[in-house]
Image (spheres, grey):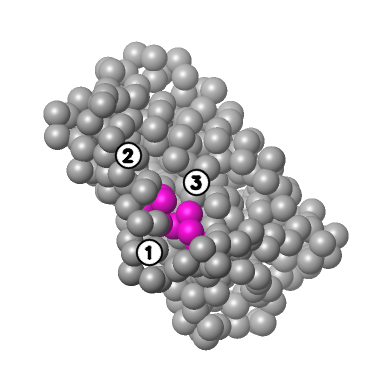
Amino acid sequence: MKSAIATRAVHSRVFGISVGALTLLAVSLFFLSGMVSPVTGDKGLALKSANEWISSPSLDFIAGLAGSGLTLLAMWLLNKVHNVLRSVTSLYIAFFTAMQAATPDLAGQFYTGTVLAVLVPFCMLLLFSVYRSSHASYRVFLIFLLLSFFTATQYVFAVYVPVFLLGIAQMGVFNRRTMVAAVLGLVTPWWLMFGFGVIDLADIHMPHIVNIFTQIDTDESIVLLVAVGFTSLCMLVCFILNVLRTIAYNARARAVNGAFTVTGLVTLIAMCVDYANILSYIPLLNFCAAMECTHYFSTHRADKSYIAIAAITVVYAALYLCQTVI
């Protein structure tokens, strides 16, 4: 009986908000301690990358937290509107914020990773809304317009263009009209920026990417890799465990879960290939992993599943402490 109550408790809004509040406190203390190492360098292709948009450290910190808040809002909307988690749960709040706390250096600043973790989930909201719709063109156009525009600030956004092209097919709306809409969406931001003189050919440049592992010491590198590795492991294990259950879903639910799977796997592959720019993918990896893990635990509510949930949360708390106390 007590185990069942504990399991229900970890899925409650109180638990999710409590972990989120502790994460907010932890990241704030990390920022106030002065240990934050800002992401530096212009990594844009034509416009400045997001890490150079805000010069004030305090405003940068607030914007970073606001970005995480918007990602949580997108997660809530995805479940509220499209029922992607197949149950009523707030566990994703606890998972995502705990994962963010494991890299407090990144959670407390605004940079490309922050923007990517907001943009992709909101584009997913648009994508899922066009499932087998005969009026998908406008929303498809908006998805690719946003991805194309932000590609001017860093190339990582271009990685998700093929992801959403595949997503269109998964939603059953891959046809001539949506392909034209996608192409126009990709072209329009650049046409407008050149047309209004925001940029010119001289502004197009290769991004200045510095290998993060040459800028931080060995201990920080190890903690970062352990955090990324553990998050990746949790996501992959939960994906494998979810497969048999998702097979029994209806076509729409399978399409939605397939889109999440592709996004998570492409993010992992991109992090391996583009390891010098790994920081830009971490918040989105946390989003994908939090949704995948919540999906598993929300559909497998064994009486003692709260133990695994607590263990995962404790690991992320330990990773945070490794960067502060130890």
The numbered mark, 3 or 2, whose residue comes first in the sequence reads 3
- As drawn, 130 above or below 325: above
Q: Which residue is more in the foreground, 169 or 21?
A: 169
Q: Is residue 298 above or below residue 143?
A: above
Closer to viewer: mark 3 or mark 1: 1
Which residue does the image show at 22% across and 31% down from the upper left? 177
Q: Which mark is residue 74?
A: none
At numbered mark 1, what does the secondary structure look like: helix, strand or loop? helix
Q: Amino acid at mark 2?
A: Ala
Residue 136 in view in this figure: yes
Q: Residue at x 40, y 71 (%)?
A: 198
Q: Residues within 10 Å of mark 2 (few under 14, many from 20)?
A: many
- Residue on which disc 1 sits: 193
Residue assigned mark 2: 182
Q: What's the CA distance linking mark 3 and mark 1?
A: 17 Å
- Magenta range: 146-153
Residue 158 is labelled as 3
User: Quick one: label 1 or label 2, which is nearer the N terminus?
Assistant: 2
Res. 286 visible in picture:
no
Q: Amino acid at mark 1?
A: Met
Nearer to us: label 1 or label 2: 1
Instruction: From this view, report whether residue 127 is shown above or below residue 284.
Output: above
